């Protein structure tokens, strides 16, 4: 439904944002692991991407909490600002839906923003965002390979960390895409998924020390803010340039 142009806009926005955020993190002097977590959360799919990326990044709990806070705050701002911006941009339902799906951090935030401009924009925004979420699996596998290469270059072990959950993710996408699973099963499964993610975040919070978060200073927050502005700007520019709207 998104089409090849739409997929290209989403993929290019993701890659450019991840690369830009990684570069800017080095310029600002932000810890490399925290930078990678913020980059993943901003470019892919928010808190889920942060937690998934940490399976290969292996950052501290405080790094994960900081990155999750960044994507939550800036993604929430997008829910308010993007529908307001559409009053001047007039991208249309398809263009606006694609913009929300390609730039806003969390799935729920995309739904909240896109449906403000009507049913068509909401449906298309949701589909565009889920297309972006699908890119989580190859990104995590690539990051694992890069991490192994970096450790090998530093004289450490060269074996890539294997995020086994990615293969489970791909398998479940395949099962859901067959249409064989009845909606009566999918709805409770979604509720269980949300509950388990909430428990994972709560457990992470119990391991987080606010004093260590404060010690990180304002540079990671600045990184998250600039990355947020970047992905909104680059995705909008690509939509306009490609005529995807």
Image (tube, rainbow, N blue to C red):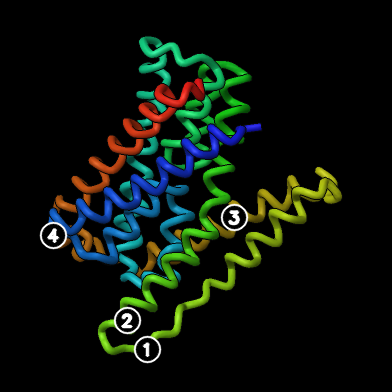
Upstream in sequence: badge 3 or badge 4: 4
- Residue position for label 4: 29
Q: Nearer the viewer, mark 4 or mark 2?
A: 2
Q: Position of residue 20 (x, y in %)?
A: 27, 48
Q: Quadrant of residue 13?
A: top left
Q: Nearer the viewer, mark 1 or mark 4?
A: 1
Per the rendering, the mark at residue 242 is none
Per the rendering, the mark at residue 151 is 2
Give the CA separation, mark 1 to mark 4.
26 Å
Upstream in sequence: badge 4 or badge 2: 4
> In the rendered structure, are the residues bearing label 4 and label 2 in contact, judged by CB atoms less than 8 Å apart?
no
Per the rendering, the mark at residue 157 is 1
Q: Residues within 10 Å of mark 3 (few under 14, many from 20)?
A: few
Q: Quadrant of residue 27?
A: bottom left
> In the rendered structure, are the residues bearing label 2 and label 1 in contact, judged by CB atoms less than 8 Å apart?
yes
> In the rendered structure, are the residues bearing label 3 and label 2 in contact, judged by CB atoms less than 8 Å apart?
no
- Residue position for label 3: 195
Q: Position of residue 144 (x, y in %)?
A: 44, 71
Q: Residues within 10 Å of mark 2 (few under 14, many from 20)?
A: some
Upstream in sequence: badge 3 or badge 1: 1
């Amino acid at each position: 439904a998104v089409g090849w142009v739409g997929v290209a806009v989403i993929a290019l926005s993701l890659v450019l944002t991840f690369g830009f955020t990684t570069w800017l993190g080095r310029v600002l002097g932000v810890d490399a692991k925290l930078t990678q977590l913020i980059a993943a959360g901003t470019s892919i799919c928010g808190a889920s991407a942060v937690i998934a990326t940490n399976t290969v990044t292996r950052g501290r709990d405080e790094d994960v909490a900081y990155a999750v806070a960044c994507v939550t705050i800036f993604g929430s701002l997008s829910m308010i600002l993007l529908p307001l911006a559409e009053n001047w941009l007039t991208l249309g339902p398809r263009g606006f839906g694609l913009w929300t799906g390609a730039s806003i951090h969390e799935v729920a935030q995309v739904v909240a923003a896109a449906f403000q401009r009507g049913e068509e924009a909401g449906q298309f925004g949701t589909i565009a965002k889920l297309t972006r979420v699908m890119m989580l699996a190859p990104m995590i596998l690539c990051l694992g390979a890069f991490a192994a290469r970096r450790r090998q270059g530093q004289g450490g072990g060269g074996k890539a960390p294997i995020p086994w959950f990615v293969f489970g993710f791909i398998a479940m996408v395949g099962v859901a895409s067959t249409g064989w699973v009845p909606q009566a099963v999918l709805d409770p499964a979604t509720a269980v998924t949300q509950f388990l993610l909430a428990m994972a975040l709560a457990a992470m919070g119990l391991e987080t020390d606010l004093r260590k978060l404060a010690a990180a200073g304002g540079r990671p927050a600045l990184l998250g803010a600039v990355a947020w502005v970047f992905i909104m700007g680059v995705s909008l520019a690509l939509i306009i340039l490609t005529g995807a709207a």
